[in-house]
Amino acid sequence: MSFHQTLKNKLVSKEEALRRVNGLHFFGKKVVFTNGCFDILHAGHVDYLNQARDLGNLLILGLNTDSSVKRMQKAPNRPINDESSRAAVLAGLACVDMIVLFDEDTPYELIKFLQPDVLVKGDDYQIEKIVGYDIVTARGGEVITIPFLQGYSTTRLVDKIVSGK
């Protein structure tokens, strides 16, 4: 399959994602959801996403749009890569089954719409405070944190590029 076709199959509307989720739920499959900016993909991201995918039968990645990343005020120059570029790189990962862009400040409405079975974030979050915890646990799902691969950070990578060190 060509890369263009892979991207077309993986970057989907929330309505298409829901159609696929409902089909998987019908067959008793487990849907995993995570989200983030994934501005400059690094080994820590790949490790995290592979671990998330291992928790179910399908991994949906909620990807922040450029405007939602800017509202987070991570840094004045973020995102470095636009949402189309970030989605294209993520679509190249075998562990990512679907990518859905969201423009809100949090993925709460997307999680509510898709009703995943497992919600995953990094272990820098307290489980009960993860956005969507209430939605997923109310229907008997799991909320799980995954430890980060030490030594990897987009902010640290950007700082290293800017400083030249």
Image (cartoon, rainbow, N blue to C red):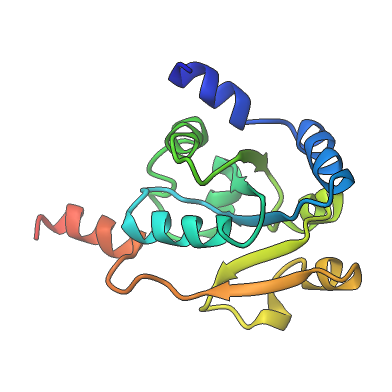
Residue 20 locus on image (x, y percent): 78, 36
User: Could you tell me which residue is drawn at 68 percent across and 44 percent down?
Assistant: 103
Report the side of 153 relative to 65 (left or right).
left
- Whether 6 is drawn above or below 95: the answer is above
Question: Of residues 6 and 133, which is closer to you in this image?
Answer: 6
Residue 93 locus on image (x, y percent): 45, 40
Q: Residue furthest front?
A: 27
Question: Of residues 67 and 125, which is closer to you in this image?
Answer: 125
Residue 15 locus on image (x, y percent): 82, 33
Rendering quarter of residue 13: top right
How many marks can you see? 0
User: Could you tell me which residue is drawn at 67 percent across and 50 percent down?
Assistant: 57
Residue 40 locus on image (x, y percent): 36, 48
Report the side of 78 relative to 22 (left or right).
left
- Whether 97 is drawn above or below 122: the answer is above
Quadrant location, the C terminus = bottom left
Q: Residue furthest left?
A: 165
User: Could you tell me which residue is drawn at 78 percent across and 56 percent down?
Assistant: 116
Question: Of residues 40 and 23, which is closer to you in this image?
Answer: 23
User: Could you tell me which residue is drawn at 74 percent across and 55 percent down?
Assistant: 30
Rendering quarter of residue 130: bottom right
Rendering quarter of residue 131: bottom right
